[in-house]
Image (cartoon, rainbow, N blue to C red):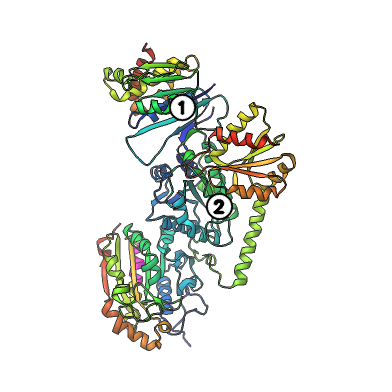
Amino acid sequence: MFEQMIIAGFGGQGVLFVGKTLAYLGMDIGKNLSWLPSYGPEMRGGTCNCSVIISDDKIGSPIITNPDTLIVMNKPSLEKFVDAVKSGGLIVLDSSLIDSKVQRDDVTVKYIPAMEIAENHGNSQLGNMVMAGAYIKAREPIFSIDDLYESVKAHIPPAKMQLAEKNIELIKAGYEYN
Amino acid sequence: MEKIFDRPHSLSDVVLSYCPGCTHGVVHRLIAEVVDEMGLEGKTIGIAPVGCSVTAYNFFEFDMQEAAHGRAPAVATGIKRVHPDNLVFTYQGDGDLAAIGTAETIHSAARAENITIIFINNTIYGMTGGQMAPTSLVNQVTQTTPYGRKVENQGYPVHVSEMMATIKGACYVERVSVDSIPNIKKTKAAIRKAFECQLAGKGFSLVEILSTCPTNWGMTPVEALDRIRTEMMPEFPLGVYKDCTDEGGVR
Amino acid sequence: MGNKVLMKGNEALAEAAMRCGCRFFFGYPITPQTELAAYMAKKMQKNGGTFLQAESEIAAINMVYGASGAGARVMTSSSSPGISLKQEGISYIAGADLPCLIVNIVRGGPGLGGIQPAQSDYFQATKGGGHGDYHLLVFAPSSVQELADLTSLAFDKADEYRMPAMIMGDGMLGQMMEPVEFKEYVDLKDLPEKPWATTGTQMKRKKNIINSLYLTPEELEELCVKRQERYNKIMETEALYEEIQTEDADLIIVAYGTLARIAMSAVSEARSQGLKVGLIRPITLWPFPAKVFEKRAETSKAFLSVEMSMGQMVEDVKLSVNGKRPVYFYGRTGGMVPQQSAILAEIKKYIKNM
């Protein structure tokens, strides 16, 4: 396995957290991984992204020039990264936040109204988890949804376990969305 | 014959490097006497500054560190955090403490750092040959103020004790002088009180000591002592500027 | 798979430092090393240690001087402009033969520069950023795991040789998360004894003096000569490096830190295209691993130093290769990171004429 993904959106959407969630998954299934955020002087607002690599082999560059996967949660980020995605790659796109279509026919695009789904589940903050579920669905069988559930539970402090359950509920909603 | 006057044990048996008539030697002796009387030699760590007393580590028998110019309170902070039960004091001149090391002085006090600063104020840079100090008096002639310190060019002297007394973390601040026997006795009492303040964990203490520099002042030792009284004391009045020791300190 | 945890480089460094017995941290905030200090602030007290935010970098490094002279394992961390401020203190620490760890999470310069990754403090770190004849042990980790491992090694070597050590990273390494496995906490009683430290004489020994002032030139020279003998021994025995596919390489890339990983990816890509390229990754920047260059100058045709600077380490590569082979340079600076494709293009540029 050598999966390079860029996760991008606005600051505050939980972009870095989805990346971290998938990085934990990689660690828990015994892969090498790296998680690299973009960083700047601003604390909030503006676009934000992180690069996650999950690999069987030792990881060289943690910087991704051409991702296998783009998980994207706002329009400026789509415009920034859409052309960088490898031919044959995957784009998971929050269609409740991005109204345009991807103008490429050499990539698989999965449109999912993640924010809307999250709102329907009573938590508009967790669109990022919906995206994670949709991503796993698209990447089966190299990842398994059950491994992700386990991983989410494993890395949340016991005191916040209901948060893990909420996250899993939204991951599941994303996973099951068609 | 009974010996009635001797070198304190914690004062090294070496020739001091100071000029004749300089009062550094007096203050060194007072510190050593207090350390001896309080039985503290084995647990004292001193910090020497940059200035005439840069080699003060040669003159005491207890452990010493030599600090970069102005940084003695930071060095003392590092030491005291490692050895909170030891007596840690810095010995600093006016250039070291009130010019290049102002920030370290203020912030060690603001942190209520449990250390003691012995501050020698002689209104001049001695070691480098008599330049203007932050405490130089208005109209004082120095190598770098050959026509006198002028307000319109070099401004006013810094009043360290007054300034330090405004800092909440300072527990005990007193200005003393070594111009006369009664004042030397008061200086010794102040040093002792500062050390006691530290050992009781009450917080930051500073003793400012008005001192001489006959060489760079261009005076005889006697004239120099007289200058402390006639010129320095009016600008830098003696007295206790802050004392929270009775209230249990500031920590 | 052991007890791996996912951690940012900055945090992993802090955790590793506490685990190997560091109980004193003095620092001043600066981007991009803030997570390190924040982690220390949170954890140091629980470990019975001291975290202190000083009034300036200058005060912080002098607190390090005091605490080290008092016998403690102590560290500070900063980033380029802050490290410049600390140079006076670092020179004094070296001059007083004190061990400590200084972390530089390098950012673009000169001046206020930027906050993105850079390697433009190489000269400052390896050639003595402060005044006088002295060196730091300089370690350049390229992964979060290595960051943790080298932190512990840096403290040990600093104690062994009584000299300051530096970890040079960059914002990329500091911000990056990777799985890391830590050593167990050491018992502070097992740390090396420091009979030279100012701990108070307890009236049981002669006084100890921590000092860098020697007004007699003969005495100062003698001390510098003795220190140089120690440095010579270190240069002989302590250099660390990694070699990848160098044995049959026509062109050898030289890169350190996170950039070495990008270079490694470029080397792999070049190899997959049949190009005979290898990589030497210095892990210690001082001592510089000169011997491997002497050896590889015999077997390869040229070297290419790739840096996030305008060309600093390339001088050490040239000195080590000593004119036997051409040494080329490719660099980006100011926070720009050379891309894998750009490194590959450089490789092709040179290798086609071989």
Vertical relation: B177 (above or below) A156: below
Give residue C123's mark: 2
Q: Nearer the viewer, residue A27 or A48?
A: A48
Residue A156 visible (yes or no): no
User: Whole-percent x and y of residue C351?
Assistant: 67, 35
Looking at the rendered structure, the kind of residue marked 2 is Phe
Residues tagged 2 and 1 counted as in contact (Cβ below 8 A): no
Give residue A23's mark: 1
* Crowd tier of the residue under label 1, counting other residues whose Cα lies within 10 Å: few below 14, some 14–19, many 20 or above: many
Q: Main secondary structure of the magenta part?
A: helix
User: Whole-percent x and y of residue C134?
Assistant: 58, 59
In reply to whether residue C298 is colored magenta, the answer given is no
Question: Mark 1 belongs to which subunit?
Answer: A
Quadrant, the C terminus of chain A: top left
Quadrant location of residue B219?
Answer: bottom left
Left or right: C131 in relation to A145: right
Left or right: A122 in relation to C32: left
User: Whole-percent x and y of residue B84?
Assistant: 41, 57
What's the CA distance linking mark 2 and mark 1?
36 Å
Left or right: C268 in relation to C56: right
Question: Mark 2 belongs to which subunit?
Answer: C
Tag 2, which secondary structure?
A: helix
Segment tinted magenta in the rendering: B191-199
Which residue is drawn at the image coordinates 63% and 36% (left, top)?
Answer: C349
Looking at the rendered structure, the kind of residue marked 1 is Ala
Tag 1, which secondary structure?
A: helix
Vertical relation: C215 (above or below) B19: above
**Callout in the foreground (2, 1):** 2
Quadrant, the N terminus of chain A: top right
* Crowd tier of the residue under label 2, counting other residues whose Cα lies within 10 Å: few below 14, some 14–19, many 20 or above: some
Q: Nearer the viewer, residue C31 or C19?
A: C31
Quadrant location of residue C54?
Answer: bottom left
